[in-house]
Amino acid sequence: MLIAPLLLFVVVTFIVPILSMLFRSVENDIVPDTIPGVVTELAEWDGSVGAPPSEQVFRYLYLDLFKASEAKQHTRLGTRLNYEKTGLSSLLRTTGRSLDDVGEEWQDPLEDIDANFKDGAFWYQMMSGTDGEDLLEERRDLWAAMVGESMAGDVGFVPSEQVAQMLPWTTRAYTDFAIWTAIEDEDSVAEEDPWEAVYGALGMDLTNPETVSAIQSYTGPGADALKAAAANVGQLPQTGFREAFAAENEDWLSPDVWATIKLYSSSMTSGYFLNAVDMQLTPDGIEQKPENQQIYTQLFMRTLVMALIITASCVVLGYPVAWLLANLPMRTASILMILVLLPFWTSLLVRTSAWKVLLQQQGVINEILVWLGFVNDADRLILMNNATGTIIAMTHILLPFMILPLYSVMKTIQPSYLRAAKSLGATNWTAFWRVYFPQSVPGIGAGSILVFILAIGYYITPEIVGGTSGVFISNRIAYHISSSLNWGLAAALGSILLVVVLGLYWCYDKIVGIDNVKLGG
Amino acid sequence: MTDGASNDAFVEFERVQKSYDGETLVVKDLNLSMPKGEFLTMLGPSGSGKTTCLMMLAGFETATHGDIRLGGVSINNIPPHKRGIGMVFQNYALFPHMTIAENLAFPLEVRKLGKAEREQKVKRALDMVEMGDFGGRRPAQLSGGQQQRVALARALVFEPELVLMDEPLGALDKQLREKMQFEITYLAHQLGITTVYVTHDQTEALTMSDRVAVFDDGRIQQLAPPDKLYETPENSFVAQFIGENNTLEGVVKEIKGNTCVIELDGGEVIDAVPVNVSKVGERTRVSIRPERVEYNRDRLHADAHTLKAEVLEFIYMGDIFRTRLRVAGNDEFVIKTRNAPDQVRLKRGQQIEIGWLAEDCRALDA
Ligand SMILES: Nc1ncnc2c1ncn2[C@@H]1O[C@H](COP(=O)(O)OP(=O)(O)O)[C@@H](O)[C@H]1O
Ligand SMILES: [Mg+2]
């Protein structure tokens, strides 16, 4: 019971973020949430034929995108799809701007046919009715999914079931308009002129012969205007929405664009993970990315290798220090211990910046080397903004994490072991190597795991002294989180890092045995 | 075995002093000489410098002053691993990461013995301590007693001529300790090794050793075989430290030859052997062993001095009776009598007269 708060704390601050990261690395709701109609309709489309999808798909695209651009969601969709195929972001952005123009191609002739179509109140009267509650809720849910809000509240409008049967596209478009107007804009639906998309939708309905014949026997509100429209269908654009989109941008006819949209239309995707290992999902299956776009596998390897080098240098430098700490007389050891712990009392940023001062080409180390004549003034050592700088600075920063576990293990090795070995005839070196060292191995293990795991995820130091060739995978993750905002990719990279660390830990357990790791007595 | 130095001394300490901090002497003027094959025990209270002496002999501490010789050669400048001295530590110091067999093979390996010879010697040493079946185990998988045997075998496996043991039985229970005491002495004599054994347990020292060096305050207080130590302690410390002892304080009244007369602080007069007293009027502590006190007038000399005593407590202990008396104002005066058929059993409150043979009562330093 007493650990309940702690347990809660761990779950909330540790497990939940990890799970949410794992989830985010495969999550792809944005496509199905933003263009749900397109996603459903595209399922039928066969991309291998090399032809763009049917008019039906473009109709859904028009209505979904119109909604999205009203809600300013279409750019998000563009950003998401752009990760997979460059150019989609600008395609969606430019198209988003001209959706109104497309709708006006239907709006203008319709208003010419019957002036009532100009009047918001007329539309409200015509579309209102009874029994349409289910449709209203359905449209409300779609809105909610797209904008990520509940969209709850009184719309002040209920679609007529009868009109919905007759004019399905128009009713859907008008209901979407009504919900947005009432909930987001907080205006009265009856007083607002409908979106251009509603006219476009009416145009879609009027291409259906069944609708036209149903209008003939319709007697409800707006029957005259509808009949007039049905009678003058010829005045409406004879081209469909596919042509309308194509006129805005040729790319809408490209099967490649549609293949990409279809590939990433499910709510889960392996795309981020493939990206993170320099692969990509194409309509033909999983492929290696072009040579010049491969960065992550190389970066992972570099991170691993550099973390190993840093760990090894920490062992080499830390072991003698820990030995001194454990074997010097109490007073001297305490002073040494303070020196070891001193860095902990200094900000990480300050320490790293100090290394910057030391390692620069005009920095302290180079100046001294030049002054001593070891290095020519002309070819000063490049110690910074490369892997060397990262390794030097990180070895120093992580050294205490090696020394402390080593020290606490060494402290438990009683001097009588060394004495026993010597009394049995071993020289100082043999006694150390055969008796002392094996007993200190658990400390090396603990220190190495600690340093390695800290190093592999390190961020600040490589960022400051690493330049481009000395950065770690975590710097890339940070870039995707804060600059490119590709959180899915960042999450996938993070998840891979987590798996790699767990995998290495497992290997370590198999080879050395985790029981052989001691942090102290 | 003889007291003091001899020409064929194997281990010798000559005027050895040791100070850790450069101020206080932990070992003050140690002189000791052991012949080959002797089992010598250093006995003394904790902190009296026993371990320090052992460490100097093993080479882990250097003497501040004086000379330590092994086989006639000064070893002051020989590093520990070249001294060839076997050592058993109080905590056994078995290498935890090696098996028992590897532990035993270690001294042979560093001496570059061949594999076959190594295995044979390890096996023989393990059999010697009846641990033949445990070669493949780790030290942590053995009981304390078993670890003790292995530590012993490891100290002996490379056939050293001198073995040092620092309270090797300190961590064992009483029964195991007694068994091991016997085994260690048996092995030491069997193999003819010279042994320096350190303990603070006087029973252990008395039962095991050829000679015992009683340590106190950095000095050897007495160096003698166990019986001599018990029967003829040379000073009050040794008399008190070894076995049970009654002490009475007083002033020397008269010395004639090897007896003297002491007047106790209460005015009573007794006979004693002058050991540490030389002139009349000197203060002294007389020491008398509980089993040497007589209360049966018939067994004393006609002219022996006697003391009045009151029985405070009578304890029946089976083989002996232990009686506590008030004698000359001392309430802790104890006598022990054998449980024989004709033995008188004293009662509490009974007034008796006690006495002793003058040679059993020793007048020591005050
Ligand atoms: N390494 C050391 N440094 C300083 N003082 C020590 C050291 N070892 C022992 N001493 C001191 O020397 C004295 C004798 O110790 P030691 O030889 O261990 O006694 P014993 O073994 O008879 O109990 C003690 O007062 C102890 O505190
Ligand atoms: Mg000791």
Image: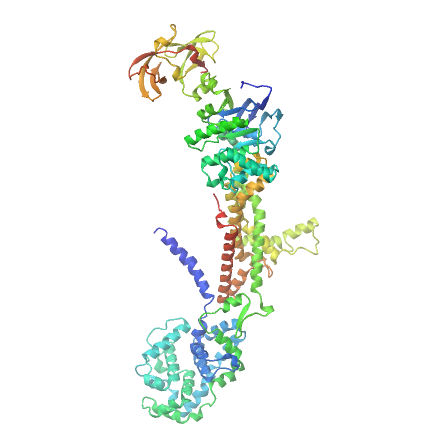
Which color scheme does this rendered protein use? rainbow
- Identify the residue at image location x=71%, y=53%: A376
On the image, the x and y values in percent for residue B355 come to 37, 11
Total numbered badges shown on the rendered structure: 0
Q: Nearer the viewer, residue B303 or A471?
A: B303
On screen, residue A99 versus residue A319, left or right, reads left
Q: Is residue B118 above or below residue B305?
A: below
Between A508 and B106, the one lying in front of the other is B106
A211 left or right, relative to B189:
left
Q: Position of residue B25 (x, y in %)?
A: 53, 26
- Answer left or right for B72 relative to B343: right
Task: Tell me which residue sits at (38%, 5%) in the image.
Answer: B302
The answer to whether residue A314 of the structure is visible from this angle is yes
Q: Nearer the viewer, residue B184 or A232?
A: B184
Residue in view at x 41 percent, y 55 percent = A10
Position of A214 relative to B308 (above/below): below
Residue B141 x %, y %: 46, 41
